[in-house]
Amino acid sequence: MWKKFRYIKKHRIKSATVDPDHKIIIDINYTNNSRVISSGDHGLNKLFVRMVFWLQAFLDMPEIVVIPFSLSQ
């Protein structure tokens, strides 16, 4: 069941959402109800978030992190 919409405007559509109020109860996955057309910088953002996550996880393990100098001299 597809419905095609045509908009005759000078501005392009940036995003579209199906069932934004979540009224269709049969829908299991609400995360796939929208589509956004934007620039291609999502890959860099995703990579940066993953790197920060793993850096924080690594630094949260004090038994693994070795400090190369001693504070008590």
Image (spheres, helix red, strand yellow):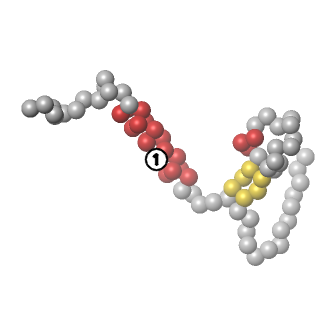
Q: Is residue 58 left or right of residue 65?
A: right
- Is residue 53 shown above or below 66? below
Q: Position of residue 45 (x, y in %)?
A: 51, 50
Look at 82% across and 37% down and name the residue there. 27
Q: Is 59 in front, or is 42?
A: 59
Look at 76% across and 56% down and name the residue there. 16
Q: Position of residue 26 (x, y in %)?
A: 86, 35
| Residue farthest to the left, as pictured | 73
| Residue farthest to the top, as pictured | 63
Q: Is residue 46 left or right of residue 56?
A: right
Where does label 1 land, which residue? 48
Specify the amino acid type for callout 1. Answer: Phe
| Residue farthest to the bottom, as pictured | 10
Q: Position of residue 41 (x, y in %)?
A: 54, 56
- Is residue 20 shown above or below 12? above
Quadrant location of the C terminus in the rendered image:
top left
Q: Is residue 5 left or right of residue 70?
A: right
Look at 72% across and 52% down and name the residue there. 35
What is the secondary structure assignment of the residue under circle 1? helix
Q: Position of residue 18 (x, y in %)?
A: 81, 50
Where residue 57 sits, quadrant-wise, is: top left
Look at 87% across and 58% down and name the residue there. 4
Q: Is 65 in front, or is 39?
A: 65
